Image (cartoon, coloured by chain):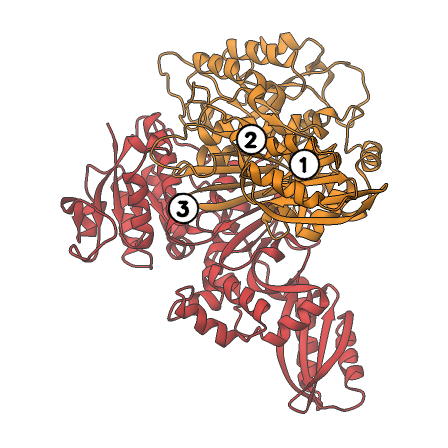
Chain colours: A red, B orange
Amino acid sequence: MAFKVGLLGLGTVGTGVAQIMQAPQGRHPLLHEMSLHRVGVKFIDKPRTIDVPSEILTTNLEAIVTDPDLDVVVEVIGGLEPARSLILTAIAQGKHVVTANKAVIARYGDEIFTAANEAGVYVMLEAAVAGGIPVIQPLKQSLGGNRIRSVTGILNGTTNYILTQMQQSGRDFAEILQEAQALGYAEADPTADVDGLDAGDKIAILASLAFGGRIKLDQVHREGIRQVSAADITYAEKLGFVIKLLAVAQVPTGHTVGDAPPAQLEVRVHPTLVPKLHPLASVNDVYNAILIEADPLGQVMFLGPGAGAGPTASAVVSDLINIVALLKSGLTANTPETNIIHPLLACSHHHYAQIAPMDALVTRFYARFLTQDHPGVIGHLGTCFGSRGVSLESVVQTGFQDGLAEIVVVTHDVREGDFHQALTDIRHLDAINHIPSILRVL
Amino acid sequence: MAFKVGLLGLGTVGTGVAQIMQAPQGRHPLLHEMSLHRVGVKFIDKPRTIDVPSEILTTNLEAIVTDPDLDVVVEVIGGLEPARSLILTAIAQGKHVVTANKAVIARYGDEIFTAANEAGVYVMLEAAVAGGIPVIQPLKQSLGGNRIRSVTGILNGTTNYILTQMQQSGRDFAEILQEAQALGYAEADPTADVDGLDAGDKIAILASLAFGGRIKLDQVHREGIRQVSAADITYAEKLGFVIKLLAVAQVPTGHTVGDAPPAQLEVRVHPTLVPKLHPLASVNDVYNAILIEADPLGQVMFLGPGAGAGPTASAVVSDLINIVALLKSGLTANTPETNIIHPLLACSHHHYAQIAPMDALVTRFYARFLTQDHPGVIGHLGTCFGSRGVSLESVVQTGFQDGLAEIVVVTHDVREGDFHQALTDIRHLDAINHIPSILRVL
């Protein structure tokens, strides 16, 4: 008997999922033990690239999540509502859920996993982060022997495409964004991507899995790539770096990864100067990558397509196969009598992680200043930094722009709070016209 | 109640495993539910870097695998015997097995998995391939929605270290090998590594998992790096390549990855010219990487430390955690009454895959010839290749060596059999002195 799957959404990803399920040959044998039972769409009669029997199509999504015949609901409609309510209803009806919805999980993970644990069902989300790259599953099932020190990712394909194009062509952000929009790599409203919100959702989810605590999304520092200019990319290049939008979750620098779980976590998204020889530096275009540092493992990196119908559908179907494997082997908590649940697939943590304030971050900085071309400006800058305890690695006058001298500063590791205090002092200097960019350095 | 683990071997990896188990804090909570019950060693009194209670140490390995109290046996003694017999005894006694032993699994996988299926136990082997990189688990659990087209790996750290050093220093194989032996990166008898045997074991295991058929190890083409010279590395570099020892398992070129499982598989290990921009080209030193191409996923790559105590122990413990998760949730086939087994963790295939003969391989070749410095030699070479249907991309006389002209040839995609027939013809040419290297090109 095949297990019955309900699919919410038949857009790009939904179509990809249905295509795999309709052609199980040559894939995992468990695909033969699931069937696409109902598919929720907005318009029944819309022309489609896939042939789905019209009798299983419905516009009534509520009817799918409450259908007593269904074992699993796949949510790939995206957005916050009705996705959140549909997921919660499916859970309340004792159905397992597979979702690709990072926005819902990052915001309502607490509510959703609490409900899932009470109902004894699984909520699986491999597709929510980094598209087709298996990263949720390895975090849940392959790294448990380790104490994780950091998870650093290139998690947003749109911004990585834009930065790669800027790097390769020397052109500026706005121009490349427009081009990316024309090619369909960026949305008409690019805010979620270019302002780091999408990457913020994803790193919150990874942080939660890696460090075993829930994350309040509004505590995640999210900074996008709008401020990154062609000039910065050029100077970074000369200094031996490329600029990437990194999403980072880590135990603060200087804290040992020891017996006790870390008291605080850093969880942040920001454009970052990455040394050219660093494994993340060569991850280009729409590719995603996740680098995990752990003890005693060392560094492992996962690289692959971070979006797109095929990769995302691959991740969704992998979750479906895992759920069907459990259903088939009798391992579900669905019946209150047995109450067996797989401890690696269920969400086991209930507390919120303490997020370290950004001021406490210890990092290197790159900053570009436009100043009056007065003698002694570099000295004044140096004094301001020095008096706040910010030690500099290099100060270079790189040239002139619109009659102003351009100065690029790179610091040693400093406390972010100290650096910003120094910047406040510097902004009061007469000679300072403008600070067009402040970037962190990996 | 903690599940009881018996550890066979307290060398580098065994010590790493014991260290993780002795300090479970800050790692997965399931580590608190397992205990190190017995440890098998060669010498009880050997000085050790780890403090293991002497009452759990024993030199009687047979007593461990037959101990009725044990739930899981971890085999990290390596080698073929007694490892194979101990694993089989443990299975016969109804114990789950975790092993890091690629040699045993690649040779006796058939026997071992058949026994495990009959006994209803799991045999887990994440540590057998690519050290700490999670790759067995993703292949079993994360890629099932796909039709896999190829698995290409840098799976041997020793040879990758040697090739990287040759590349970076311009020095020759023998010199770097000696240095690697002095540093402990290569064994005193380096055969298994430098002749591609170790990588052959590993790709046989990966092929079996990726394509779902058992592999006869003697059908795996294994070619090592002894023939790679500093000259080849220099010419490869000029042509835009680096040389890597690749282990490849793939559906033959030109065969679609369609509804039916592939009729034949290529499984092979050989030094290969890899384009500098290819993701595997920048995997250096003792790092390992596995690139998987699948439909509809596209390409994903896993990168990390391929050996060492910490990484290998991380993989062993990940398997232990997965087994304990199943034991805890009641999902084991251990009791014949219930007979529930997790279909993603058990070995489900029983047939042998058909391995395509190397002659049928379609690939590009790089070959270096030493010839008499006669006019017309390049023409003769071209004629020999042409008459066997081998189309050339470039023929370059690169210089002279010991009074002989050195000619480097790169072909287009050709049938390996045709290429070798052309070489046989060429060896009969009067002007040909020697063909010091023949390498495939990715």
Q: Residue at x 61, y 53 (%)?
A: B277
Q: Nearer the viewer, mark 1 or mark 3?
A: 1
Asked if labels 3 and 1 touch by Cβ distance under 8 angstroms, the answer is: no
Amino acid of disc 3 = Leu
Q: Which residue is mark 3?
A: A125
* Of A80 and B223, the residue lying toward us: B223
* Residue B436 in the image, given as x and y percentages of width and height: 74, 35
**Are discs 1 and 3 located on one and the same chain?**
no
Where residue B267 appears, x then y in whole percent?
Answer: 54, 29
According to the picture, the residue beneath numbered tag 1 turns out to be: B438
Q: Tell me if residue A14 comes above or below residue A334 in the rendering.
A: below
Q: Is residue A430 left or right of residue B268?
A: right
Query: The C terminus of chain B is located in which quarter?
Result: top right
Left or right of residue A58, residue A103 in this image: right
Distance of label 2 from label 1 (alpha carbons): 13 Å
Residue B49 sits in quarter:
top right
Q: Residue furthest front?
A: B375
The mark closer to the camera, 2 or 3, is 2
Q: Which of the marked residues, 2 or 1, is nearer the chain's N terminus?
A: 2
Mark number, residue B417:
2
Q: Chain of mark 2?
A: B
Q: Residue at x 57, y 22 (%)?
A: B98
Q: Nearer the viewer, mark 2 or mark 1?
A: 2
Dots 2, 3 in contact, CB < 8 A: no
